Image (spheres, rainbow, N blue to C red):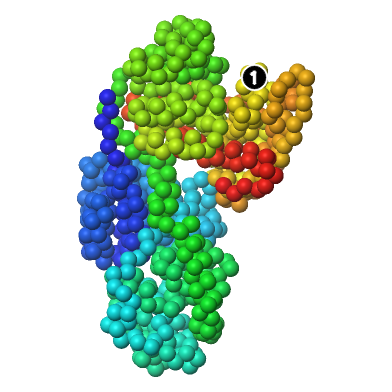
Amino acid sequence: MLDCAKAHIVLATDSLDPSGMGEHMLALGRALSDRFKMTLALPGLSRGRPMMARAKRYGMAVKVLDRDFSAWLSGADVDLLHVHAGIGWEGHDLARSALAIGLPVIRTEHLPYVLTDDEQKERYFEGIANIDQIVVVSKASEQSYRENGIAGLKLTTVFNGVYPLETTRPPKSIVEDLELEGARVLLTTARFTQQKNHAILMEALPAIVRNHPDVLLLAAGEGPQLDAIRSLADNLGLSKHVRFLGQRSDIGNLMSIAEFFVLPSLFEGLPLVLLEAMAAGVPVVASKVGGNCDALGEDHPFYFCPTDAVGLGEMVCFALSRPDLGETTAKAARRRYRAQFSAERMAAETASIYLRHLPQGSPIRRKTTMETVRIGFIGAGGIARRHLDIIAGFDDVQLVGLADPDLERANSAASVFGMRGFTDALAMLAECEIDAAFVCVPPFAHGDIERELAERRIPFFVEKPLSLDIETAEEVACLAEDLVTAVGYHWRYLDTVEEARNLLISNPAQLVAGYWLDQTPPPRWWWKQAAAGGQIVEQATHIIDLARYLVGDITEVSGLSNHLERADFPGLDVATASVSNLRFATGAVGTISSTCLLRWGHRIGLHLFADGLAIELSERDIMVDVGAGRPSRTAGGDPVLLQDRHFIDAVKGRPNNIRCRYRDALQTHRVALAISDSMRTCQTVTI
């Protein structure tokens, strides 16, 4: 039925000297080559040609950039272009080539925003106008882009990650070959450019040598300022204390003999060599600039001002006088690397971005489309009936089977739509040939059926919540990574939500207030924490997801709740009132209030506040207040119909416009469960 293959991702840069950026691309392609078809594209005359040979060893294809790049993209069955840029004027022509043929484009900025020329700024904003996602490599870089007008949902941070460097020889033999016996070795390795600030290191070195005459600096790398730095070292009388090694492929060996690694950069995105030093357990003396601080942490003891040669000299002398502190710091840095800066972690986060933007939504690319989609339903409750009523009106769908433990209810619903009724989903799957399934079951019933569908490679739509625990949902997400999936967060399909989303792109929300103030639903399973998970997990999850969709990922939660016994609801043990505090990755803060104490639906919605802007959203309408009254309008269309239509179209192999796939819903579910845990423990939970 389906022609399945890995999605084809192209990592491309037009930089003539990709340097550390090229290493980043190699690491990313290496880590993702088992999940996607990865191609590395570099200019034919660039210094990156040796990287192409390494790319092939890592299982990647290679492409030399030339004038036929646009035509090659069209004919090479490419699914997504990931452009990498060292500075603002790079990469725009590559992006335009992909956008012209309808490919999604991701752009990674490897440096902070450093453009100062107005014309360059204008060209940059024109260049990024239509790309799908901008990725920055550190929180400091993210801040620099936000300060220069790039914010909202288009901007996200994925910390750089590296593989540990290999050490191919014992340290003793390296010391002997380089004639370093008795020397205290400082190492710096970077391209010789103004950004890397080698001059200040040379200016600091005389004072270091006076205090520590046995110091010798190894400087590896090439670049346009190499000759000038050599001359400066000679003029300062440092010929016996500096060794210029040129471009080296054995940095791991050099790390193994270094007492300290020194990085004097004026600015950084998130330097790979710093992460490599951390992974190697080499203590670091670094300039206190954004990307370095993101890597090492604000409490790192060996920082200096990048414009202060005296301060650099004093800091290196201090570090050399405290080898015990250096060793302790290096151990902490190695733990920090393992926790936050591995290549595998970087690749996993990048893959999740790809999956949000791939035309088919996942690395299944369909060569043909189906005429009719055969649908099976698991669950026959009220939400299932809503989907059935809608889907029955689609002329390209055949409803073939419905499973529900209550056979009478299953047969009753099935008979209305000309389906077969079953009490068991496995029996339905065994007897009915289906192309996709709708899973509309209570929270406690999720897990086994999604696993079964994933193993049978059957695309599925799931009504929230995903499960009662995070482990089940995570397992399903992994099993279904390459399937078309959707989750019923239908608020994302409201035209009013899209209106709010557009308003917030250039003026992000800073304060969020969510509400689910409602009555207690009649199903007895809903009354039980062990069966439903409580109001936050089962109902207010819609508000959590809407907040994530409009504001960004939630990084920290805390919650409080109480419980009121009520005679009308015997045995109800879920919280009857709660309040949750939220912190977003953007810096925004918010609350969600919920209660099931009422006898009516009082307020269900989300309020958002930005600079001079207030938005109130419900499932029915939107109010936008900019200080000139409170104009509101009613939402148009049926979001559930649109949601179902997009899922069916994706299953058929048409362009995938699903707005919430299982992997995305997993993060919403993670937040809801974290809030529930916080209410139970009265502790703040970091996501």
Location of residue 392 by image quarter: top left
Q: Is 442 left, or right, of 216 in this rendering?
A: right
Q: Is residue 574 in view from this perspective?
A: yes
Location of residue 227 by image quarter: bottom left
What residue appears at the point 52 percent right and 31 percent down from the top-left corner? Answer: 466
What residue appears at the point 56 percent right and 32 percent down from the top-left corner? Answer: 468
Q: Is 197 left, or right, of 625 in this rendering?
A: left
Q: Is residue 43 in view from this perspective?
A: no
Front one among 24 and 505: 24
Front one among 523 and 463: 523
Q: Is 539 left, or right, of 279 in this rendering?
A: right
- Where is residue 331 drawn, in percent x and y? 49, 68
- Where is residue 257 drawn, in percent x and y? 37, 77
Q: Is disc 1 surrounded by few (<14), some (14 to 19) or many (20+) residues within 10 Å?
A: some
Front one among 513 and 408: 408
- Where is residue 2 drawn, in percent x and y? 28, 28
What residue appears at the point 48 percent right and 53 percent down from the top-left corner? Answer: 157
In the picture of the structure, the residue carrying the numbered disc 1 is 524
Residue type highlighted by circle 1: Arg
Q: Is 134 left, or right, of 546 in this rendering?
A: left
Vertical position of residue 281 compared to residue 226: above or below: above
Kind of element beneath mark 1: helix
